[in-house]
Structures are given as C-alpha cells and as structure tokens.
Amino acid sequence: EIVLTQSPASLSVSPGDRATLSCRASQSISSNLAWYQQKPGQAPRLLIYGASTRATGIPPTFSGSGSGTEFTLTISSLQSEDSAHYYCQQYNNWPRTFGQGTKVEIK
Amino acid sequence: QVQLVESGGGVVQPGGSLRLSCAASGFSFSLYGMHWVRQAPGKGLEWVAFIAFYGSNEDYADSVKGRFTISRDNSKYTLFLQMNSLRAEDTAVYYCAKRLKLGTDAFDVWGLGTVVTVSS
C-alpha cells in the first residue's frame, strides 16, 4: 500500500499570503495524484488531478506540481474562504489512498 | 445538474448489516467507474471500494474485504454498498464518488454522504 504523508499537519496564514502544502509518497506514483479541499460539514471538492491539472471551475489561485514521490499544492493569495482541510490522494496503485490532511487556517 | 445522493445509513449493532444506496443523475452513469469513500468522526478520508462501469471489476480496502460488497444497477442509475459483519470502526460518513474518467481515478463528483453508526 502506498502511504501518502502530508506536511505540515496545520498551517496558519494571513489573508493575501501564499500557502504551500506538501505530499510525499512512499514510492513513485508518477503524476497520478489529486488534491481535494474539504470544509466542515461538506463533501470533499476536487481541486487538482494529474498532479497539476486544475479541475473544472477551480480558480488559478490553486496550483499543483511534482511527480514521482514529491508533490506540492500552492494556494496563492489566500482568502477567508480557503480555510479548510486539504487532502492528497494517489491513484497509481490499488488500494487508492489518501494523505492524512493539512488544515489551513486564516489568521 | 450532476448529482449523487446517498441513503441507507443509520444506527446498527456490531455484527449487523446495512445496505447503502447512491442515486446518480445528470450524467451517463453507466459510462463511469464509481467509488465509496468514508470518513470516521474527526478523521481523514479512507477509500473503501470501487466498481468498474460495466460492473464486473471490483476492488476493496483490506479493512472491508470479505465484509462489504459493492454493486451497481446501471438501468436505475444506482450504486450500492452492502455492509455485513459491521464493527465499531466502520462508524463513519460514507460518500459515493464518481471517477473523473477512465485512467484517472480522481473523484470529481461526491454525494453529501450518509452516516453509519455501529454501536450497541
């Protein structure tokens, strides 16, 4: 099973600043990685797939990068509505697995 | 619009069974693989099961293998999860989710979830 390790566990950022979230895979997963945003009481929302392709309707403030074992989600110019948990997920191997999540808070 | 609506959750005793349903609308259900994902209270996301668009290819997380069965009725645009021998650790919100496209198992459509509580 591929283990995804996200860092940091939590992040507090001022409005307008940039947030950088990391996801590390226990073995190479090529570019088969997705990122999700989840707000309290809501279902997750797909942000990024293929490590760097924004999903439909996702603003360019969200960007993804990386391949192999190291991946990054960058949220530029954070707004209050970006406060949420963020999860990475790999789909290179079965079983599909998620990282444990990063909580982003706005100061 | 594209929508998934889960139902069938509830409170069940350990060792009991439940059958979850997920009604799909707004897209060609029979053309897409589908998944179940769960989230225990206060915890992260855990993938549970997958079924291919044609229904005969399935996969399961080790934690539910042999106890849960995923199935689908393409004529009724409905996905199912039969859960047997339930344990306390199966307590979670259960989401159904649509595969983005063949070869890309990112989940682009999610339901709102149905709550399963396993408790005596």
Image: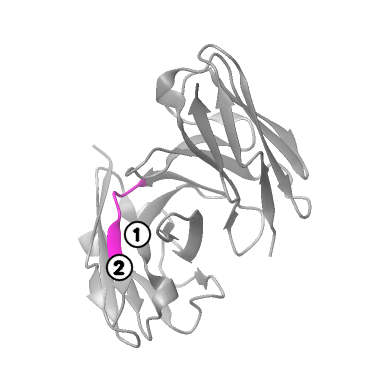
Residue B116 — which label? 2
Residue A79: x and y in percent read 45, 17
* Amino acid on which the number 1 mark rests in the picture: Val
Q: Which residues are magenta?
A: B110-116
Q: Which quarter of the figure has residue A6?
A: top right
Q: Chain of mark 2?
A: B
Residue A61: x and y in percent read 53, 18
Magenta span contains residue B26: no
Depth order, front residue of B54/B92: B92
Residue A49: x and y in percent read 57, 38
- B92 over A13 or under it: above or below: below
* C-alpha separation, residue under disc 1 versus residue under disc 2: 6 Å
Label 1 vs 2, first from the N-terminus: 1
Residue depicted at x 59% and y 31%: A11
Q: Can residue B79 be seen in the rendering of this structure?
A: no
Q: Can residue B110 be seen in the rendering of this structure?
A: yes
- A57 over B83 or under it: above or below: above
Q: Is residue B57 left or right of residue A2?
A: left
Residue B93 — which label? 1
Q: Which quarter of the figure has residue B56?
A: bottom left
Residue depicted at x 51% and y 71%: B60
Residue depicted at x 26% and y 79%: B12
Give the SS element for disc 1.
Answer: strand
* Amino acid on which the number 2 mark rests in the picture: Val
Residue positioned most to the front: A107
Other residues around mark 2 within 10 Å, as few (<14) / some (14–19) / many (≥20): many
The N terminus of chain B appears in which quarter of the rendering? top left
Q: Chain of mark 1?
A: B
| Contact? badges 1 and 2 (CB < 8 Å) | yes
Residue B110 — which label? none
